[in-house]
Amino acid sequence: MDIQSRPMKIKNDTNTTRDNATIDVSIIIVAWNVKDFVHNCLKSVYEQTKGITFEVIYVDNGSEDGSVDMVTKEFPEVRIIKNEKNEGFTKANNQGIQISKGRYVLLLNSDTIVLDNAITKTVKFADSHPEAAVVGCKVLNSDSTLQRNCFMYPSILNMLLSAIYLHKFFSKSKFFGRERMTWWDFNDVREVETVGGCFSLVRRKAIDQVGLMDETYFVYGDDPDWCYRFKKSGWKIIFTPNGQIIHYDGQNTQSMTRKFFWQLNGSRLIFMKIHKSRWEFLLAKLLIAFFLFPRIPYWLARGVFCKDERQKSFETAITYLIGGFYCLTDWTKLLMNAEVVKKKLREVSITRKG
């Protein structure tokens, strides 16, 4: 890991402060081979953040597209951590948090665009709600439609409802739409269980109490786990629509779709293994397999009858087949950091027995 730190400057009321002054928020951006998105994200941060002091920490996960050189040249105020390989989203964020100095830490995805002073608005809201460990803002898709960024913790009920897809047909139902909160328009302040990590403002005091993100999660699952731990320690997780961002979603993972799809489901199983009972974990594995296997015939048929989508459809069917098989045999094969997870789970098992 190479840390490049340059003297920080004050430009009007928008940029980072001197080391001996108070920084309101440390903005941490992690990326892997998405140079253009990083550029646009940083540009929006500096153009759309007024009235607070902040620093920006860019953690590069082994990019080979010139991202570090671009940031160095075009955004000299940014502090850079350069990893030689992809260390995972969670570990990279922790690296940024460990050198950060702000009263708050903002985890901001590299494929986002900050709108209309969103960071300042969210910081001001957090200042007026000292009970909140995490505050999230309103997230929009690239076409300005709503992107749901608050959801419930993984559970047997939530996973079952997801597997049977009834939330698609009864989106206004608080029961069937509970996991993704599809019944809610995200236009009011509300206490939630989890705020998605594309824009997650976290209070330093809460981090000091609860600890860093759990690096058992290579990517995905880190946000519900952290929010769950904050909640257990008496903190609140709050959503406010005051600030808005655009999130293009998934740009860091597009080049390895199959592995990241497996990792997504594997991360849910990590949560169940760590935080739930043995029988809930076993049932969760069955539910994910139940979600995957029945969809295989659909993708095979699509591959046969839709020539333009043949390759993608067959690849999806194979991904579902292998993923379901892993769930029923060795679920850790879903994970991109299986050995790290196995070690952590052994430690958790020993702690529980003790």
Image (spheres, grey):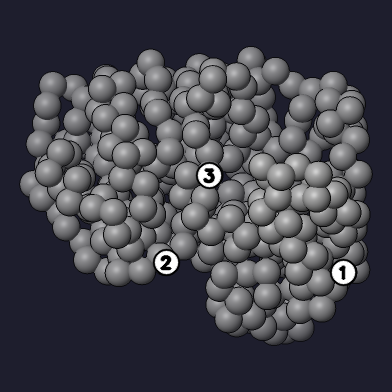
**Amino acid residing under circle 2:** Glu
Q: Nearer the viewer, residue 74 or 223?
A: 74
Place of residue 238 in the rendered image (x, y in percent of width and height, measured from the top left) = 60, 31
Few, some or many residues within 10 Å of mark 3 (<14, 14–19, 20+) = few
Residue at horizontal 65%, vertical 30%?
Answer: 148
**Amino acid residing under circle 3:** Gly
Q: Which residue is mark 3?
A: 250
Marks 1, 2: nearer the viewer:
2
Place of residue 190 in the rendered image (x, y in percent of width and height, measured from the top left) = 66, 24
**Mark 1: which secondary structure?**
helix
Q: Which residue is mark 1?
A: 282
175 w.r.t. 50: above or below: below
Separation of disc 1 and disc 3 at Cα?
Answer: 29 Å
The quadrant in which residue 82 appears is: bottom left
Image mark count:
3
Q: Which residue is mark 2?
A: 87
The quadrant in which residue 327 appears is: bottom right
